[in-house]
Amino acid sequence: MRSSAVVTGVLAVLCLLLVAGEWPPLLSFDRAVAEALHRSAVGHPEVTAFARVFSDWVWDPLTMRALAAAAVIALWWRGERRRAAWVAVTTVVALGMQHVLKAAVGRERPVWPDPVDSARFAAFPSGHAMAATVTCGLLLWVLALSRREPWRGWGTVAGLSVVSVLGVGWTRVYLGVHWPSDVIGGWLLGWCLVASAVLAYRWSERRFPRPLPRCVPPPPAAPRSRMGEKE
């Protein structure tokens, strides 16, 4: 997990620098991919409508944060207060980081003569991609901690998480509201944040272990009856 946090962190910073510095090869790549997908979106309105439903509702950041909030409530109710706090804080930090970077970079979104969708605020990083990565990563983490024994549904949940993270990134570029590097930056930043949160949680578990439950002494044994015994 440490190597994952370091690698994604370095790549995220590199992506940020290339976007902010407007590196020509990256801009050419973004333009070529975005134009190809936009032509497809204009020519296939049924696919575009399908993408809008998933992008604006199923994989919307509000939906993802609602899932994170539900996980926090469930963990708190089960007595896993530290894990609940970790999920809540990581989700809030991701939201704050996203807005700070958007304001700092100030990247313009793609502009089309025939748009199929619209979005507000700056482009980098993609809030949809970052929110999906953080939420799905945190949910898989708390689920892995909660279920020690083999579980048949694990593959299904993991598969849905991967499809959600990759799918929302594709829809944002397909709908013409993000450049590909916006989505890549959101993925990298989101996973780096999840990996860092997991590492910090493990450190806190070692540094501040939870107290063991007190052992309640057994009740004193009842005195034996001496009826029938000879004096």
Image (spheres, helix red, strand yellow):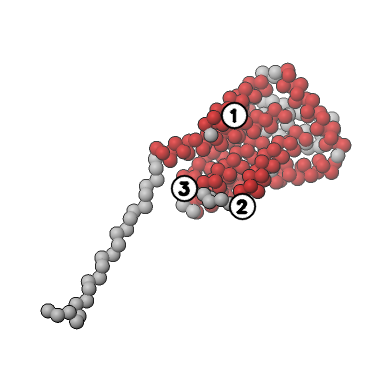
Q: Position of residue 36 (x, y in %)?
A: 82, 30
- Is the Cβ of the residue at disc 2 closer than 8 Å to that at disc 1? no
Quadrant of the rendered image containing residue 184 = top right
Closest to the observer, 121 or 126 = 126
**Does 12 appear above or below 133?**
above
Q: Element type at marker 1?
A: helix
The disc label shown at residue 81, or none: 3
Per the image, the residue denoted by label 1 is: 8
- Total numbered badges shown on the rendered structure: 3
Q: Position of residue 35 (x, y in %)?
A: 81, 28
Task: Report how far apart the C-alphas of labels 3 and 1 lie in the structure.
Answer: 28 Å
Task: Report how far apart the C-alphas of labels 2 and 1 lie in the structure.
Answer: 30 Å
Left or right: residue 152 versus residue 180 is left
Q: Residue at (66%, 44%) from the top-left corner?
A: 159
Per the image, the residue denoted by label 2 is: 152
Q: Element type at marker 2?
A: loop
